[in-house]
Amino acid sequence: MSSRNGIPELEINNPSNEEAEDFTPEKRLLIAIVQRALIDYIAPEKGKAHLQYDAGAWIFSEKKDRPFTLFWVCEILSVDPIHLHKRIQIAARSKAYKPKCVIMRVDTK
């Protein structure tokens, strides 16, 4: 997982999908959810600390088997949630950036 402007990129590796069109709208929605949580947690907008708290609660929730938890979303997207947690913690400790967006790379090989 690489990063840009200090925020981890969400790299999706799904070897079973040979074509980009197999990346369904539902999966794209799940990616957008994770991206928004990353932005809200790592670089919240001024005056919106409550979003950082809510995003952190969602990101680091220990609930694993419920729909729409980070673990569930990561399973659907074939992303290692433990590795993602580590990258998020590293990025959150570094405050030398003010990102505007999260960059996502989809690897469909």
Image: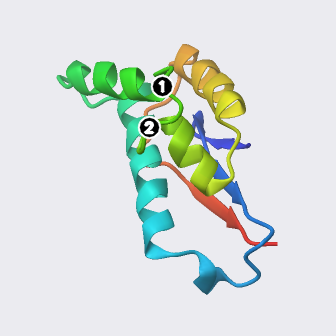
Real-space CA distance between mark 1 and mark 2, rounded to the nearest whole angstrom: 7 Å
The residue nearer to you, when weighing 67 against 36, is 67
- Image coords of residue 105 (percent x, y): 65, 61
- Image coords of residue 74 (percent x, y): 59, 45
As drawn, the label of residue 66 is 2
Report the residue at 48% width, 25% height from top.
63
Q: Quadrant of residue 76?
A: bottom right
Report the residue at 56% width, 14% height from top.
93
Q: Quadrant of the C terminus?
A: bottom right
Q: Quadrant of residue 14?
A: bottom right
Q: Which element is circle 2 on?
A: loop
The residue nearer to you, when weighing 3 against 14, is 14
Above or below residue 104? Residue 40 is above
Residue at the disc numbered 1? 63
Q: Quadrant of the N terminus?
A: top right
Task: Specify the amino acid type for callout 2.
Answer: Arg
Above or below residue 14? Residue 95 is above
